Amino acid sequence: MINTIIKASQNFCIHQIRMPYTVSNGISEKRTLIAYIDIEEQSGKKHRVYVASDINFMQRISTLFLDEVDSDEETLIDMALETVNLIVGSAKVIAEETQDNPYTIQTPHFLKIDNFDFIYDESRVIKIENDEMIIAIKEL
């Protein structure tokens, strides 16, 4: 499952952000905006997908979509929710097309702005220049 979400994240970097990126294992130690969305596989298994971006990564997205170079906290939170929705929604389409554990998605939720300290099963860090975004998944 993490593979389709990472593929969707890479597509987001390529087609939306249009900047070189790297993907690595692990978790960033930076303070992040943390949002999640719950998904349910056709088999009934449920997962929580976290997307946690440092402030600069989310500001990059806000500048891209809203043309704002200095967004307030509320706007960055809205962009975090939209980002998790876009990435996991795209991953849902990829999973359906490849028959790789198709699933349904729920409504995204914002958790907090802080270090990522949630229990997870798998994670990756996507880095663009010095900006980082964590993708983590936990079976519920």
Image: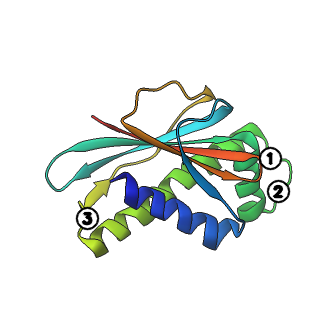
Foreground mark, 2 or 3, reads 3
- The kind of secondary structure element at disc 1 is loop
Judged left or right of residue 125, residue 55 is right
Give, as a three-letter code, the residue at label 1.
Answer: Ser
Query: Total marks drawn?
Result: 3
Q: How is the image coloured?
A: rainbow
Q: Residue at x 35, y 49 (%)?
A: 106
Q: Earlier in the sequence, mark 2 or mark 3?
A: 2
Q: Position of residue 117 (x, y in %)?
A: 52, 24
- When asked about the image quadrant of residue 21, the answer is bottom right
- The kind of secondary structure element at disc 3 is loop
Q: Is residue 101 above or below residue 37?
A: below
Viewer-proximal residue among 132 and 67: 132
Q: Earlier in the sequence, mark 1 or mark 3?
A: 1
Marks 2 and 1 in Cβ contact (< 8 Å) = yes
> In 3D space, how far apart are the residues under numbered discs 2 and 3 (Cα atoms)?
37 Å
Q: Quadrant of the N terminus?
A: bottom left
Judged left or right of residue 71, residue 45 is left
Q: Residue at x 36, y 69 (%)?
A: 93
> In 3D space, how far apart are the residues under numbered discs 1 and 3 (Cα atoms)?
37 Å
Q: Is residue 30 above or below residue 77?
A: above
Q: Which mark is residue 68?
A: 2
Q: Is residue 33 above or below residue 126?
A: above
Q: Position of residue 79 (x, y in %)?
A: 64, 50
Label 3: which residue? Answer: 100
Q: Around disc 3, counting alpha carbons within 10 Å, would you say few (fewer than 14), some (14 to 19), or many (20 or more)? A: some
Judged left or right of residue 17, residue 47 is left
Q: Position of residue 5 (x, y in %)?
A: 43, 57
Q: Position of residue 56 (x, y in %)?
A: 76, 45
- The kind of secondary structure element at disc 2 is loop
Label 1: which residue? Answer: 71
Q: Residue at x 35, y 63 (%)?
A: 92
